[in-house]
Each structure stands twice: as structure tokens, then as C-alpha cells.
Image (spheres, rainbow, N blue to C red):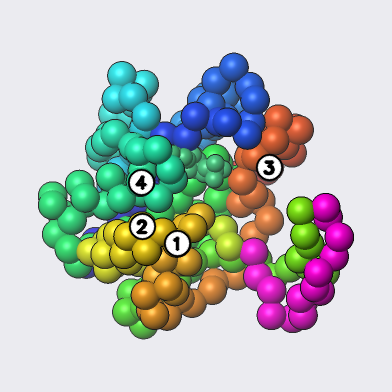
Amino acid sequence: SPFWAVVPAAGTGRRFGADQPKQFVRIGEQSVLAHTLQRLAAVPGLAGIVLVVADLADAGDWSQLAVPVVAVRGGAERADSVMAGLYWLVAEQGPDCWALVHDAARPGVRVADVVTLMDYCAAHDLGAILALPARDTIKTADAGAMVLETLPRDSIWLAQTPQCFRADQLLRALKEAAEQGLPVTDEASAMQAVGEPVQLIRGHWHNTKLTEPEDFPLIEWILSQHD
Ligand code: C5P
């Protein structure tokens, strides 16, 4: 079955605090989103990209990329935006295609890591995500930042994107999670909530998410590394 990327880029940047959402800020000659789409379009075997935006008027012209880019309108939360992309994918490309959900705000994603992820999913017919083993010791804490618990580091991974699942299975899981009111900050948590296995594939720290304005110099450097 074909692999399609679904790129949620419909965030309004509440936490970010710039005058425009972080995915539209320029780094060098082009926007963060353009860097992200360019990396994805360079992935061998990718059939196309579903770009999810808040306003279709801001979708941009991606006709120069090597794969087709289809723009759809997103929703209030990240999970709503992903579901909007998946509705298009299931309806137009069929329920069996693979959806590689990748944050617009992760322009440093490496083509080789996406290929490893796709190869794993195709070979094992299982969902998988890029992730990194935790380097720091992870604490849970109360609202006053008083430590509650220290988690065993050996079993802690940090989830990245792409997160790759069959489009129809992921759509069903996200719908069910929404119905149950579960907080879903990534696709894997929805799949896990409905009892589906999720394999972690070791990624690279360059695939960090642009979260704070302070991250810009780092992302700029990462994008200069040509990986
Ligand atoms: O806010 P956060 O960093 O978790 O956003 C991750 C990605 O999800 C960003 O690319 C953002 O544009 C996207 N998003 C979205 N629709 C929303 C909220 C976030 O597509 N309602």
C-alpha cells in the first residue's frame, strides 16, 4: 500500500508567542513549513502529502515539489487536524494506505530515518513511530513542581514524528479517543488506547520540534547540516 504524509500545520501558535504561527516563520530563504515539506518530498517512495492548514488561503503553492500536495482544513486541536487529513486520505486513496503523520514544526526530520520507519511498517505490517531514548532522568511533579516520582530511565523514550499507521485504523483510534475524552497529543497514544501495538524506531535529535522562539538558532544550524 502507498505511503502518504499527513502534515498538521493548522496550529495557531498559542504557546509560541510570535506574530505568526511558528510553521510560517522564515528560516533562511523559506518558511519552516517549506523546509519540512521539502524533506518529506525527498523521501523515496512517498506517494504524496496531505497538508492540513487552518485557512486554505494560506496553503501555499507546492507544485514545484516532487510529490503532489493536497491541502485540507484543520481543526481546533492537533488531533482534529490529523483526523481532517485522514478523512481525505481514506476517502480519496483508500483505507489501507499508510499515513505518516509529521509535525510541520519538525523541519529537521532526516530522510534516512523516515525510510527506516517506512521499511519497518511495510515489512512487519505494524504501526511505528520515530522516538529517542531519554538522556535525562525524568520526574513527574505536582502543580508546585515538587517531585512526585522518578521514572526508570531505561524504559523512557521521547516520541517524535513521523508516526506511521494504517490510515483507517488511525482514524478510528483517534475518533474513539476523542469520544472517550482522552488527551491525545500524538497518534501513538490513540493507537495505544485502543490496544494496538506501536513500535518505537530510534530517530535523531535533529528532528526536534520548534517549540520556543529560542529554538530558532538551533533549528537554523540543524537545517544547515544537509542531512
Ligand atoms: O502545538 P504543537 O507543537 O503540539 O503542534 C504540533 C503540530 O501540530 C504543529 O505543526 C501545529 O501546526 C499542528 N497543529 C494543527 N492543528 C492544531 C494544533 C496544532 O495542525 N489545532
Left or right side of 44 for 156: right
Q: For residue 106, which quarter of the picture?
A: top right
Snapshot quadrant of residue 214: top right
* Marks 3 and 4, how far apart at CA: 30 Å
Disc 3: which residue: 222
- Amino acid type of the residue that numbered disc 4 sits on in the rendered structure: Asp
Q: Give me the residue at 57% from left, 24% from top.
A: 25
Q: Which numbered dot is residue 178?
A: 2
What's the mark number on residue 80?
A: 4
Q: Is mark 2 within 8 Å of ligand 1?
A: no
Rounded to the nearest whole Å, what is the CA distance between mark 1 and mark 3? 34 Å
* Nearer-N-terminus badge (1/3): 1
Residue 96: x and y in percent read 20, 67
Which residue shows up at 53% across the image and 26% down it? 21
Q: Which residues are magenta?
A: 144-158
Q: Residues within 10 Å of mark 4 (few under 14, many from 20)?
A: some
CA distance for labels 3 and 2: 35 Å
The residue at which mark 1 appears reads as: 182
